[in-house]
Image (cartoon, rainbow, N blue to C red):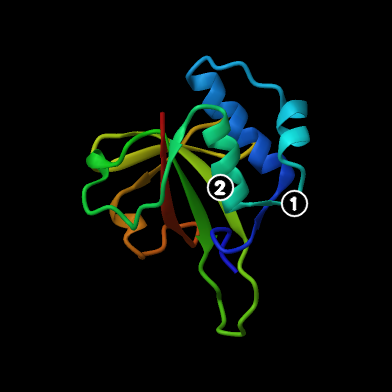
Amino acid sequence: MPASEGTLKYQETLWLLGSLCSLYRIPFDPKLVEQDFPPPHSLATFHEAARALGFKTGHSKHPADWQKLPLPAIAFLRAVPETTSGETIATIPVLILKTDGHKLLYFRAGSQAPETITVDATKGVSNQRGQRHFVFELSQ
């Protein structure tokens, strides 16, 4: 089940919200977020918490032109299954910060190391790590 239909891990939710607040220099207290939005966290809960912090949120299909996507944006990496056994496929939230139209610069939830991926690799073609991208947008 994709993250967009299920739950987000507690630490991923706090990392995403904290990172967004840090980018915009908005004070962030994870204890207050937990108090107002206790686990479990879903994508809907994430939207509510982000809006409570002053962000505008919404969903977006895969963009035809990445340069028109409001950044920062949250996306989900999803491994391509090796079999069609119907197993649940883990998703990893990422924070996309920049694009030049050909590459995306992003951080995986919980990571301090930036990564890049080509726009072509997000079109349903797996990258070398066997990952695809599914996007919803988040902007202030």
Q: Which residue is mark 1?
A: 40
Compared to 140, does 95 lie above or below? below
Q: Amino acid at mark 2?
A: Pro
Depth check: 24 or 36 in front?
36
Three-letter amino acid code at disc 1?
Answer: Pro
Quadrant containing the N terminus is bottom right
Q: In the picture provided, is 30 more to the left or to the right than 136?
A: right
Q: Position of residue 27 (x, y in %)?
A: 61, 16
Q: Name the residue tied to disc 2.
A: 93
- Up-down relation of residue 10 to residue 97 (above or below): below
Q: Is residue 111 visible?
A: no
Residue shown at 71% from the left, 22% from the top: 29
Q: Please, is residue 55 above or below residue 65 in the view?
A: above
Identify the residue at horizontal 55%, vertical 35% (top origin).
50
> Quick one: SS at disc 2?
strand
> What secondary structure is found at the residue carrying circle 1?
loop
Q: Which residue is at the front of the view, 17 or 94? A: 17
- Answer with mark 1 or mark 2, whichever residue precedes in sequence: 1
Q: Position of residue 26 (x, y in %)?
A: 55, 17
Please indicate whether residue 75 sits to the left or right of residue 42 in the image.
left
Residue at image x 55%, y 84%? Answer: 84
